[in-house]
Amino acid sequence: MPLLQCTRHFSFASPPRTARLSTSVAGATRRIPRLPAALVLGGASLAAYLRGSEEEYRSVSETELPATYDAEAIGRVWGCRCRCALARLLQIGRRALPFAGGIASDLAWDELAARTRGARPAAEAARRERHARRAVEFRRLLTELGPTFIKFGQMLSIRPDLLPPEAVYELQKLCDSVPSFATALAFDVIRHELGKEPSDLFDGLSAESEPIAAASLGQVYCCKLRQTGEVVALKVQRPDMIRAVSLDLYLLRRYMAMVEWFKKNILTGVLGAADRKSFDVALLDSFAAATYLELDYVHEAANQQRFADELCPLLDGKVYVPKVHWGHTSRKVIATEWIEGMQLAKCPPKVINSLIATGVDCFLTQLLELGFFHSDPHPGNLLVDGRGRLVLIDFGLCAEVDHVDGRALASAIVNLMRSDVKGLLDDGVRLGFLPPDFDRAALVPELQAIFNKGGKALIDLQSRRDTEAAGIAARKLPYSPRRTATSRTPSRAQFGAISRELNQVFFDFPFTVPPYFALITRALIVLEGIAVTGDPDFDIFRASYPYAARHAAKVFGVGGFATLVGEASRHSNGPKQSQPPNPSKQAGPIRERLSGDRVYSSFITADLKTGTNVGSC
């Protein structure tokens, strides 16, 4: 009886379903008008808050920003200016969120397909098609977001260990060509930087002058020095680059810090996922340092002067670097010698054939002897002057070969061309491509399948009984590759196929691709693309081997090089492990320097862009 009374008093009995439904509907109906009102009110409040973002942005003086990349200093400047940071973040988000949603959808679809269909060829083809489509969208997105993001995409395009091959290939097409800015604004920059009126410094440059080339960071005019009458290429930086780039770098770094935290604390810490990809703050800082340096034309001029002083003497006058006019050069303006010539890629086949060996020699010399190289060697930056010399221009992007084992590098080049996979993996560990404890059993068959198609090495030297004589001959190999080695054909298709397949291996296995490898590979690929227009049978491996062999003989000595070649020959035909002579010793002319000019903007594989990078548009 008391229980019954208690139940009636508190009405524990549930109301009828229809009553509950009507109550819920009524409550929802009352709340619905409030939602749009709240959105309108919130939007109005946000708009009011952001109304002063442009003034806040303009209030930042360039003198407040560091002259070289300093993440903490940039953070202090933009961290206390939340309105302009939020305004830029909303601009980025408005374009990026639809793409991010598409990526999430693709990942979910891939997971569902893997569980229901397995590894069927049709499912794999559909997956690759989706990835290729998203890669195109990603490239367009980066282009819309402006110079910083274009260059970030160019950096990612040389990291096949971070992105799938479809994305790497598409990002290689990134071009930072944009409409030119007004010459009147360029005059303002010249006045501020050089302290004089443009008419007092240059002839043939007026307010009506049009630039001959324009890219995201600056544009180029052709004019004469008023004092000497010399014709110069005058590059002027776009206004407001430091502010715009530093703000984007600040936001990117905050985002990368979130990614790094999520990887370490959630993916790795909670879910136990392997964290082998360096897509984190350190990667962003390396990119940012290089981008900041590219905004400093004094640094570009120093690069150009260094190439003229150090590279040209090594190549016996076959390569020329235009001189810098230091009196007309500053942080945002650079004047260099104007070159009357033609792009190598547009020359007659006879001229191309005569200079390709010089080009190969030029870039391998940069890597193996100078330890400092031009990292943007697209066709627009390779000219032929009236004296028949190969001319390098545009030195905003240059890179050091930092702390590289010279013997391991020379050994790797020989083993690569000899298709000695096991020896190449040993070299890869010493050069930092692979961790010491990687799974050889899984990786060796993958690489052997790539390098040994057709049952031959990339290069097959003529057999010699006297290995000592082979070493001596290698040092004296002529530049003409046809007299020293034979290779498989068709070489151009082979090289492209090898490069594409290697991209997949770099992504699937725990590789870390050093920037110098990607950039020098790019240079050789560009040269190959130019060379085949003059000689369809051109073989980049055969053209590179004479120089590589001479260098290896210099590094290892005559007997050591002969031993290396002999062991590579045995390993290409048998299971024996490679043991290059004393590879752990630091030797050879590789210069071990640590520089902030580590640049990540270009590409690695064949069938890539030709003339679609900085300065080419």
Image (tube, rainbow, N blue to C red):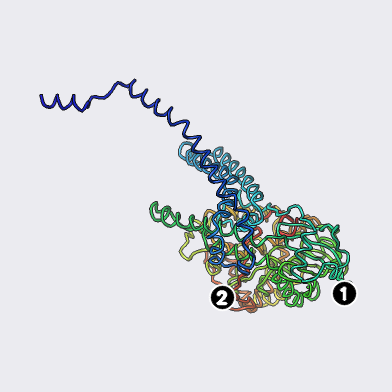
Residue type marked 1: Gln
Number of residues whose C-alpha sits closer than 10 Å to that of mark 2, classed few (under 14), some (14–19) or many (20 or more): some
The quarter holding residue 342 reads bottom right
Instruction: Give the labeled residue for mark 2.
Output: 581
Nearest the viewer among 585 and 441 is: 585
Residue denoted by label 1: 227
Instruction: Please state the horizontal and vertical placement of residue 82, each as a whole percent of the image.
Output: 54, 55
Q: Taking 302 as reference, is 502 above or below it?
A: above
Is residue 610 toward the left or the right of residue 29 in the image?
A: right
Q: Nearer the viewer, mark 2 or mark 1?
A: 1
**Kind of residue at badge 2:** Pro
Q: Which mark is residue 496?
A: none
Left or right: residue 345 compared with residue 550 = right
Residue 416 pos. (x, y %): 62, 64
Q: Is residue 251 above or below residue 389?
A: above
Along the viewing direction, whichever of 84 and 402 lies nearer the viewer: 84
Which element is circle 2 on?
Answer: loop
Q: Mark yes or no: residue 319 visible.
A: no
- Foreground residue among 386 and 183: 183
Any part of residue 12 in sight: yes
Q: Position of residue 260 (x, y in %)?
A: 48, 57
- x and y percentages locating residue 183 in the rendered image: 80, 58
Distance from Cα at disc 2 to Cα at disc 1: 58 Å
Q: Earlier in the sequence, mark 2 or mark 1?
A: 1
Q: Is residue 25 left or right of residue 596?
A: left
Mark 1 Cα-neighbour bin, 10 Å: few <14, some 14–19, many ≥20 = few
